[in-house]
Each structure stands twice: as C-alpha cells, then as structure tokens.
Image: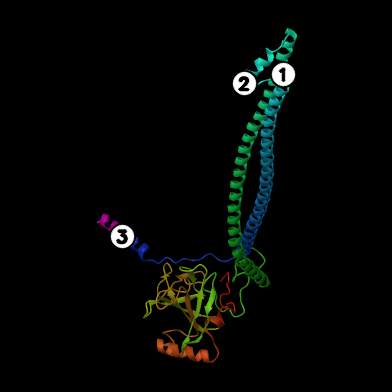
Amino acid sequence: MMKSLKYKVLLITSLMFVILPITVQAEELTFGKVLDDLAKAKAELNKNNQAINNSENKIDENNATIKSLNNQISEMSEEVNQLQQQIVDANDEIALKKEQIQNVIKYLQLSQGENLYFEYAFGAETITDFVYRISVVDQIAEHNNAMINSLQDLISQNEKKKVELANRQEDYKNKMSELDDEIKKLNNSISKLGESVPNLQQQVKSKQELVDYYKSQGCSQRGQVIGRDCAVSVSNGAFSRPMKTGYVTSWVGYRWGSLHRGLDLGSSLGRNTPLYSIGYGVITSVYRDNYGAKCVIIQYKLSNGQYYSALYAHLSKYGPGIYEGMASKDVTPNTIIGYMGDTGKAYGVHLHLEVWPCRLYGDSNCKNWDSYVQFVKKQYNKGFHGAEDVISFPNKTYTTWYSK
C-alpha cells in the first residue's frame, strides 16, 4: 500500500511539473546596456573604417610594387638590347679576326692550302729564320684563337644572360598579374565595406541619440534600470514598445476603403523577433483568427482606472508558458508573449498591434467583435489613433529604435 502511494505521489509531482506553465522573463534593460550598445556600434564602425583604410593602404603598396616591377622590366629590356648588341659586335669582331689572319698570311705571301703554316715555317733558309717563322705563326694563331675563344665565351654568356633576364621578366609579369588580381579583390572589399558605412553611422547616431535622451531623463549610472530607476515616463508612452528593436511600417488609418485598426511593426531581426507585453496585464485570449493568424489579447488597467485591450496578430508562435487567464503578476513588460511572424492573412513578416481603450469581449461597447470594430471607428474619428497615442514610436516609418 505504501509503495503504491509512493508511486502516486511521484506521478502527481511529475504531472505538476508538466502542467505548470513556465513564463520567460526577459533581462531588464539598464543604462549600462544602452552605453555598451553605443560603444559596440562605434567599435563596429571604427573596425569597418579601419578595414577600408587597410585595404586602401594595401592597394597603394601594390601599385607602388607594380610601378617598381614595370621599371625593372624596362631596365631589363634595355639590358637585353645591350646584350644583343654585344653579341652582334662580338660576331662582327670574330669575322674581323678571321679576316686579319687571312691578311697576315697573305702579307707573308703564304700559299693557300691545308698546310700553309707548315709551308711558311719550312720555307726558312736558316735555323734562325725557321725559329722566327715558327714563333710568328704560333703568336698569330694563339692570339687570334684566344680572341675568338674570348668572343665566343662572351656570346655564350650573353645568350645565357638573355635567357635569365627573359625568365625574370616573365616572373615579374606574373607577379604584376597577381598584384592586379589582389587590387581588384581589395577594391571589391572596399566597395562592400563602404556600403555598410551609412548603416553603421546611422546605428551610432541612433544609439547616441538614445543615450542622450536617457541622460536627459535622469539616467547616469550603469546599473539604473530604464523605466524603473530613470526615464520612467515618455512623452506619450503609457505603455512600452513590444520589441527591443524595430520600426513602424504602416500607421493606423483607412486603406482600401476600411479602417486599419493597428500599427504594423517590423524588425531587422525578422522572423521570430521576441514580442513583449507592453505593460502589466492579463492575457484574456490566445487563439487563431478566421485566416489562421496566431493572436494574443492582453487587457491592461492604468493607474487612472482606464482599461485598454492590446491585440497582437500574425505571431509565428506563442511565448513559452503563455495561456489564457495569465495574471498581471506574470504578464509584465519583460514577458515574451510571442514571436513575430506572418501567419494568417499577412503580406510579409510583421506584428499587427492594436491598442484601444476598452475591454474586448468585456465592456458593453466592445462585447463582441463587431461592436469592437464600431467602437474603434468612433475613437479614430474623434482623433484617437490607438497604439500611436499610447506608445512612443518614431514619427517616421522605417526609423529604427533600439530599446523598449
């Protein structure tokens, strides 16, 4: 019996863990986080600019190297021309030396034939004349052969030098081609980095403006929580924004013959951007509309006793632990109630947010959907624009904010 009871207790405990909802609370935004975001944006901009400067310096360096290689190639071309001229001159001199040998032989009145040196030498009448003639023949032959060998060595060396210079020229041209390719890549990199500059500059500007604004609202210490310790109120901000970063894509107003009751909001984070409750409230509905859009309705009560209903539509999915009847102690400005999407009748990923002063499905003037639609029209015609008038948004579409 005790063993059975023990298993039942364990089973009930396990079911409690399964059934009890888990609510996700987002981290509170501190002034230090805002300062860090600004510093990060500045560092990113500086890093981008430094990368551009480094690429430009590398391009200048490569261009200087290419210019130097071009000069060296020109010098080598001139050297090749000089070597070629030396080869021509050497060949001419070899021909001249051969002619000189023939002239000397003729001068000594030697006959032609294969044994002309021997005939000249053995034509001596005395031993002294024979020795003299042998000496003359040897000197002429030795001198001219030495000159011819020297000139032939010069020609051989010059031919080798020409080949060496030609190879060096080819190497230099290949190096220049590689440098040209690198310059093209660097220019492409600079172009891409340059495209990022305006966006990075805008981020720095926006974050700097945000820091300056919070300073004007009494924020000075890193540990101060925005909306609690400083910047407690904003100009028309009865509620906080539903995303940490985003922009307005479309305002409340008439379009195509009917009233568009909510703001359309986008985010650079795109699909699955976390969406937060705009205040402390009670979740009254979690449902899909007739088009299949995932929706959440939260009811809020301000300090003056006025009730508001906020409708979040086109969610990609609901927040962890979200359920109907979830009370204000659990539904805070840091509670993720869902994620941005395009479910239902939507033309792209966005949040459709309606905020109007009534309890939807509760007050007599909003007791059902049709009466709610008529109530909203009357409010709009009186000049009240719903979410635009109770949440502080930039006054231009696609102007990004960076805090709730």
Instruction: Tell me if label 3 and label 2 are in contact, CB under 8 Å.
Output: no
Q: Is residue 135 magenta?
A: no
Q: CA gap, disc 3 to disc 2?
A: 129 Å
**Magenta stretch?**
1-9
Mark 1: few, some, or many residues within 10 Å (few <14, many ≥20)? few
**In the image: residue 35, left or right of residue 15:** right
Callout 3: SS = helix
Quadrant of res 394: bottom right
Identify the residue position indicated by label 3 in the image: 11
Quadrant of res 57: bottom right
Callout 1: SS = helix
User: Can you tell which mark lies on residue 113?
Assistant: 2
Say which label, 3 or 1, has the lower sequence index: 3
Residue 150 showing in the rendered view: no
Q: Main secondary structure of the magenta part?
A: helix
Name the amino acid type tagged 2: Gly
Say which label, 1 or 2, has the lower sequence index: 2
